[in-house]
Image: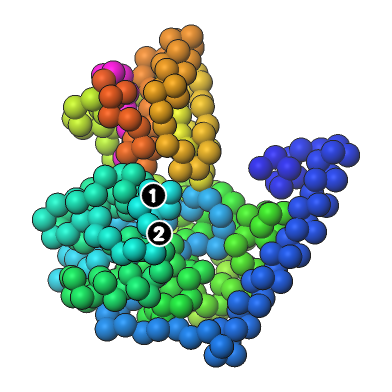
């Protein structure tokens, strides 16, 4: 990240950036070939008998996509729609292209390892709303319709998966790093060129309360003059003791020494949220995105907490589902639950 952001200086990082830029050229060729195949009709989009709404992003890493899926699922359900969520299920141990119901109308059926961390978290947050995982989104959509007959399928992380036709493309844009340092992977974090944003029907600009998003919104308007734009904030709602599941107000961390640990796409945002609720972060440990913790990791975290004098160890709700059950015994181990709050245009992307 220090290299691709330009923060790392000197001849070594400069050479690395040049090599990554060359690699981005090959990435672009692959992207262009696939885009051309869809545009020429060589690859076909399949339309299914349900309204499909994709919630995705254009930047690798965390942009607030998971809480956005949860927000829209609740909103559509409250409007009387029958909703199901379809996700790939990154990092799960079950066959990628085999459709599986993580949850149904009554309960969660799979473990986090069987479903992937994000689908499991979505299922736990959305009781009564079916969640399905399948790497083949078309196959997954047919399974979802046959099994649950939804009015709406929310396609989690679906912007780049064009084989399944959709009625809406909601793209989450993180205001803290909206365009992935302006380069395609691996030189930057862009999954597609910015021109791909012309496919979007709606933009959800996240963390809009933390940064001035004027420039980012202007670029979005230039690329896509017609898409609706919403702005949102990430709001901490609860701290959950992971040993017993009890919920506590976030103010309990005010003035407390905290060790923060996470394995998510945007750990800096998580740490900033903790500071905003008054936590004094004395140590922060960052793991790779979607990291599955083991006993050795938790031993390290506990030792670092003792060494730094931390009164609490705090992680994200997404990380919490990846912790071994036997390591959640400490009453000072907490998970922070976050929800999205729309700041303006409350229902523009939801009609």
**Secondary structure at numbered mark 1:** loop
Point out residue 266 in the picture as x, y percentages from the top left corner: 51, 43
Instruction: Specify few, some or many for label 2: CA neighbours under 10 Å numbering under 14, 14-19, or 20 or more.
Output: some
The x, y position of residue 116, in whole percent, is 36, 49
Marker disc for residue 96: 2
Front-most of residues 235 and 168: 168
Residue 350 visible in image: no
Mark 1 vs 2: CB contact within 8 A: yes
Instruction: Please tell me in which quadrant of the rendered image residue 344 appears.
Output: bottom left
On screen, residue 139 above or below 282: below
Is label 2 in a helix, a strand or a loop? Answer: loop
| Residue at the spot of label 1 | 92
The answer to whether 61 appears left or right of 278 in the picture is right
Q: Residue at x 43, y 53 (%)?
A: 90
Numbered range of the magenta stretch: 330-340
Q: Is residue 42 magenta?
A: no
């Amino acid at each position: 990240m220090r290299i691709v952001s330009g923060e790392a200086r000197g001849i070594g990082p400069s050479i690395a950036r040049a090599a990554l830029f060359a690699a981005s050229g090959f990435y672009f060729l692959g992207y262009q070939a696939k885009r051309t195949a869809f545009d020429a009709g060589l690859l076909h989009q399949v339309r299914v008998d349900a309204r499909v709404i994709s919630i995705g992003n254009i930047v690798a890493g965390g942009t607030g996509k998971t809480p956005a899926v949860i927000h829209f699922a609740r909103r559509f359900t409250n409007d009387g729609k029958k909703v199901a969520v379809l996700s790939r299920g990154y990092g799960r141990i079950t066959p990628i292209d085999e459709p599986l119901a993580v949850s149904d109308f009554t309960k969660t059926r799979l473990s986090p390892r069987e479903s992937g961390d994000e689908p499991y978290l979505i299922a736990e947050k959305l009781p009564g709303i079916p969640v399905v995982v399948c790497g083949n989104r078309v196959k997954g959509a047919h399974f979802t319709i046959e099994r649950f007959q939804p009015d709406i399928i929310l396609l989690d992380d679906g912007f780049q998966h064009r084989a399944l036709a959709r009625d809406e493309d909601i793209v989450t844009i993180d205001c803290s790093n909206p365009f992935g340092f302006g380069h395609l992977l691996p030189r930057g974090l862009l999954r597609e060129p910015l021109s791909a944003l012309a496919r979007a029907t709606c933009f959800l600009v996240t963390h809009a309360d933390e940064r001035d998003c004027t420039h980012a919104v202007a670029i979005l308007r230039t690329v896509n003059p017609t898409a609706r734009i919403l702005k949102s904030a990430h709001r901490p709602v609860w701290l959950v003791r992971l040993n017993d599941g009890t919920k506590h107000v976030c103010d309990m961390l005010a003035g407390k020494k905290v060790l923060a640990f996470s394995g998510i796409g945007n750990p800096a945002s998580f740490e900033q949220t903790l500071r905003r609720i008054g936590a004094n972060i004395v140590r922060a440990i960052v793991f790779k995105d979607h990291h599955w913790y083991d006993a050795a990791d938790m031993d390290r975290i506990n030792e670092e907490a003792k060494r730094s004098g931390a009164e609490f160890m705090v992680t994200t709700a997404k990380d919490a589902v990846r912790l071994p059950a036997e390591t959640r015994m400490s009453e000072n181990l907490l998970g922070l639950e976050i929800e999205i709050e729309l700041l303006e245009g409350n229902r523009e992307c939801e009609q």
